[in-house]
Image (cartoon, rainbow, N blue to C red):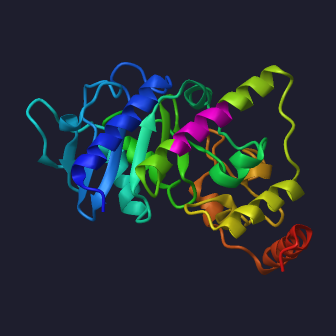
């Protein structure tokens, strides 16, 4: 088992990566890691994530209350949204919040990242909706994010940034990298006349690859098959019910699958498995 000091060092290393990759400016962003059911390590407020050392890191409980912090350091005021993720997703071991340039630009423009344009993004990342705007440091952001937690592993925060979570710190950080890379490719392809999207059959085949790989986390390959042959990648923000921002609402994915839809999904899955040579 990794000891607490090593985890603090890892948080500092990831903080520097986020800073060096221009995902945050000045003192922006925050990182947390779950160390037990009731204890979490997190970055402090008011410090650059590129210049942290282990003694900067704070320990808090599930309410965000300080258990231990060195003089002059206190947890980020955004710890509330981290705690909401942990409360609703017991499988999550780390949460990362940053302001990557391209992803945040989409968040400011109100455009979710739902277009299926590259295999890696469809298989590993899934769709990235936009949570409605909330005032920083208040409960508005955790409340806005909550409805997306059962269905996704990343969200854009309207006019704010991005939030990712996963089984451990490295995985949560790499998901942030993937969100930013996806956003940059989508932006640049739009400058070239618009991306060429995968068709529904290709998306379903990629979903089946994910299922066969047994990747952890929440993903439309397992949770968004409630519109017959539709899913979040090929209904985008238009064909499914959406909230006012063009991002998928939680109720869309919570809608039960009708028997006829389930039959269609099973038929598609069998066809894909045959194409992949999976019996």
Image quarter of the C terminus: bottom right
261 to 246, vertically: above or below: below
Q: Position of residue 208 (x, y in %)?
A: 77, 65
Query: In the rendered image, is residue 230 in sight?
Result: no
Residue at 72%, 44% in the rendered image: 237
Q: Position of residue 249 (x, y in %)?
A: 60, 52
The magenta span reads 174-183
102 to 33, vertically: above or below: above
Residue at 40%, 65% in the rendered image: 90
Residue at 62%, 26% in the rendered image: 109
Residue 14 vs residue 211, the one in the foreground: 14
Query: In the rendered image, is residue 144 in sight?
Result: yes
Q: Is residue 34 magenta?
A: no
Q: Is residue 176 magenta?
A: yes
Q: Residue furthest left?
A: 71
Q: Position of residue 202 (x, y in %)?
A: 86, 55
Residue 193 vs residue 158, the one in the foreground: 193
Q: Quadrant of residue 44?
A: top left
Q: Quadrant of residue 88?
A: bottom left
Q: Position of residue 87 (x, y in %)?
A: 36, 61
Image quarter of the N terminus: bottom left
Residue at 34%, 41% in the rendered image: 11
């Amino acid at each position: 088992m990794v000891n607490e000091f090593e985890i603090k060092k890892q948080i500092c290393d990831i903080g520097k990566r986020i800073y060096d990759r221009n995902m945050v400016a000045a003192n922006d962003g925050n990182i947390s890691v779950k160390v037990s059911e009731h204890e979490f390590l997190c970055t402090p407020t008011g410090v650059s994530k590129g210049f942290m050392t282990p003694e900067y890191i704070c320990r808090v409980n599930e309410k965000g209350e300080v258990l231990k912090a060195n003089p002059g350091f206190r947890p980020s005021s955004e710890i509330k949204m981290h705690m909401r993720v942990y409360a609703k997703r017991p499988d999550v071991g780390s949460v990362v919040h940053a302001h990557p340039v391209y992803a945040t630009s989409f968040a400011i423009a109100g455009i979710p990242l739902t277009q299926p344009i590259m295999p890696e993004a469809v298989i590993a990342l899934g769709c990235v909706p936009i949570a409605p705007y909330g005032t920083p440091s208040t409960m508005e952001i955790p409340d806005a994010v909550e409805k997306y937690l059962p269905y996704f592993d990343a969200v854009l925060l309207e006019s704010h940034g991005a939030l990712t979570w996963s089984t451990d710190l490295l995985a949560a950080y790499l998901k942030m990298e993937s969100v930013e890379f996806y956003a940059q490719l989508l932006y640049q392809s739009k400058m070239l006349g618009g991306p060429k999207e995968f068709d529904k059959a290709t998306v379903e085949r990629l979903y089946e690859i994910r299922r066969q790989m047994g990747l952890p986390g929440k993903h439309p390959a397992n949770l968004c098959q409630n519109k017959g042959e539709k899913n979040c990648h090929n209904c985008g923000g238009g064909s499914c019910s959406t909230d006012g921002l063009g991002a998928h609402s939680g109720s869309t994915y919570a809608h039960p699958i009708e028997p006829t839809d389930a039959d269609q999904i099973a038929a598609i899955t069998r066809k894909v498995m045959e194409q992949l040579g999976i019996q």
